[in-house]
Image: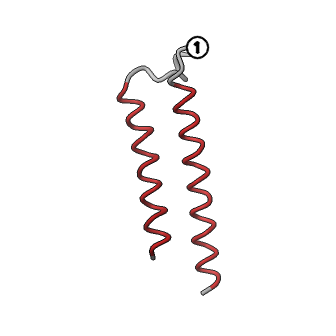
């Protein structure tokens, strides 16, 4: 039982780190000072997909914690 709980905690911790990274990347990529077209978000659709990925990870964490 303890191993399952620890595994869930490890998985949630990893997803939270991924969320934090995605949020920071999204914020950086939306800044107009970025000259690299590969890094800069070109339109709201790309930003939407980043936010959608963050939302999906949060839902996964919620489901993981509730199980």
Q: Is residue 65 left or right of residue 10?
A: left
- Residue 59 image position (x, y, % from top left): 42, 58
Q: Position of residue 24 (x, y in %)?
A: 58, 36
Determine the residue positioned at 58% across, 12% down: 35
Apparent side of residue 4 relative to residue 58 in the rendered image (left or right): right
Q: Nearer the viewer, residue 46 or 67?
A: 67
Residue most toward the bottom? 1
Residue 33: name its quadrant: top right
Q: Is residue 49 above or below residue 39?
A: below
Q: Point out the residue furthest to the left here.
A: 45
* Quarter-of-image position of residue 1: bottom right
Per the image, label 1 sits on a secondary structure element best described as: loop
Percent position (x, y) of residue 50? 45, 38
Q: From the viewer's perspective, is residue 58 above or below residue 35?
A: below
Residue labelled with disc 1 = 33
5 to the left or right of 41: right
Q: Residue at x 55, y 23 (%)?
A: 39
Q: Tell me the quadrant of the picture where the C terminus can be found.
A: bottom left
In the image, what residue occupies the spot 62% across and 51% down? Answer: 17
In the depicted view, which residue is nearer to us: 36 or 67?
67
* Left or right: 55 in relation to 8: left
């Amino acid at each position: 039982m303890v191993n399952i709980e620890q595994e869930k905690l490890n998985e949630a911790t990893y997803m939270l780190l991924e969320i934090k990274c995605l949020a920071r990347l999204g914020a950086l990529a939306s800044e107009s000072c970025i000259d690299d077209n590969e890094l800069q978000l070109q339109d709201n659709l790309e930003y939407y997909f980043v936010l959608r990925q963050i939302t999906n990870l949060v839902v996964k964490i919620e489901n993981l914690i509730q199980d």
